[in-house]
Amino acid sequence: MFLKSLSIKGFKSFADTAVLDMEPGVTVVVGPNGSGKSNVVDAIAWVLGAQAPSAVRSQKMDDVIFAGTATRAALGRAEVSITVDNASGQLPVEFSEVTITRTLFRSGESEYAMNGAPCRLLDIQELLSDVGVGRQQHVIISQGQIDAVLNARPEDRRAIIEDAAGILKYRRRKEKAQRRLQATEANLNRLSDLLREVRRQLRPLERQADAARRHGDLLAELTALRLHRAGRELATLRTRARDEAETRSQLAAAESTHHAALSRLDAEVVAAEAELASRGGDDLGDRLVRLEALRERGRGVRGVLVERLRGIERDRSALVSQQVVVGLEAELERSEAEMARLEAESEELAPDAERLALDETELAADRAAFEVDWSDGVPALGGHAAEARGELGVLRAAVAQADAERRRVAERLAALEEAADRLEVEAGRLRADLSTGETAEEPLAAEVAVAESRAHDAAVARNAAWERVVAAEADVRAATASVEALALALDEARSRAGAEHLAGVDGVLGTLLDLVEVDE
């Protein structure tokens, strides 16, 4: 695996696209001061994921974008792509070449891509960490950094060597596994709390469900008893209603009978009155009618004459003509003659009037005698009629009482039916409460099952995490052993290099290890 090419556009001094092709081995970039040699190294560090502006020698990150010159406008973004040859397969991907691209916009947005596909910075870091390349590995050594490494303290030097050996990848995996383990333990603790809370709530709910079941059974039994009692009362009331209906029919028949008797009595009374009215005689009645007619005629003629005299007096005072006066006098004479004739006729009818007066007196006496006889016979008929009316009143009172009893029975029946409806509604409500209790119990049981399942999954995840932690610790131990071996080899190489360097110096006899003998 080697760096194959580097493409830079808009990064620092590279306004136009610049592509640097490289071959296996050592590639050297030369040029005068200010030509951009350091910018090439900064571009490599930046595309590998450098996040600190100081890592690319800038005050802030957007300073890496081409700022423009007197003859060239500033750009809006910086883009760097690095291509790595993966023919050896060291990178865990199926491509022979891997191109990593980083783009930064002046708005502050940043994008990463791998072989043209958008990705995350974490994906790039994990891919490069397997081969010891990344923003935290010491793959780029600047001027003066070697002296800092040689003069560093042993613990700092050990950290540098561990980073160079690739232990950082395992350390990151270990930290990630520990974070997952802590999160899993927190989830387990939360699930345990939930399980305790659910179990604590489940006990009273079970008691409430049992109480609801018992209440439902007792309520069903009470409803059955009440319905049975209501049925018996209803049957009794229906029997009484039938008896009252029969009694009412009998009373109605008796009432009809008494009505017929009263009708017969009324007919007899009317017949008696008609007979009493017909005892006066036909001749006497005709004479009375004629006498009355004559009297009325005389009264009418007298009234006409009086009215004519009044008119004559008025006309006499108003008229002056002698002819009118003569005519009026002649009319007066005719009227006086008519008056005399009527008086003569009245005198002729005077004996008939006296005789009619005597007949009228006799008729009045006969009527008085008949009324005495009637007063003696009518009380008996009145007594029978009063007795019949009394019985009729009693029967009507009995009918009214029967109607009142029937209404009372109907009201009682309606009250019983309303009570039965209320009991049915109450039973439905209690059944709904029982169903609600059972429904509330089922979700709690389901929640308990889900919580137990989550607890089991969390336990499995915790075990898997522990296994990963153990594997990571084994990798760390192996890497530590390799680091120690590398450190020992480095010390030996440094010793040999120092010995070879001092071999030609006068006065140097060799290394201290070759000259000192130690008893075993």
Image (cartoon, rainbow, N blue to C red):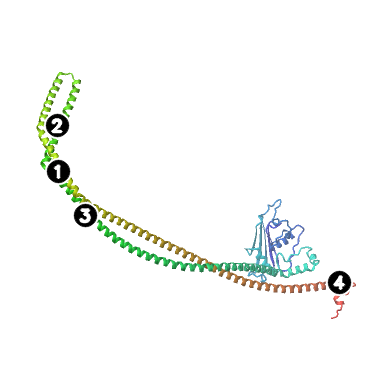
Q: Earlier in the sequence, mark 1 or mark 4?
A: 1
**Amino acid on which the number 4 mark rests in the picture:** Leu
Q: Earlier in the sequence, mark 3 or mark 1?
A: 3
Residue 1 is at least partly visible in this image: no
Q: Are marks 2 and 4 in contact (CB under 8 Å)?
A: no
User: Which residue does the numbered mark 3 point to in the structure image?
Assistant: 261
Relative to 461, does residue 348 appear above or below in the rendering?
above
Q: Secondary structure at mark 1?
A: helix
Q: Which mark is residue 298?
A: 2
248 on left or right of 135: left
| Quadrant containing the C terminus in the rendered view | bottom right
Q: Residue furthest right?
A: 507
Which label sits in the foreground, 4 or 3? 3
Q: Dot 1, how many residues are within 10 Å of its Cα: few (below 14), some (14-19), or many (20+)?
A: some
Q: Which mark is residue 366?
A: 1
Residue 36 image position (x, y, % from top left) = 74, 58
Q: Dot 2, how many residues are within 10 Å of its Cα: few (below 14), some (14-19), or many (20+)?
A: some
Q: Nearer the viewer, residue 260 or 242?
A: 260
Q: Earlier in the sequence, mark 2 or mark 4?
A: 2
Residue at 79% of width from left, 69% of height from top?
154
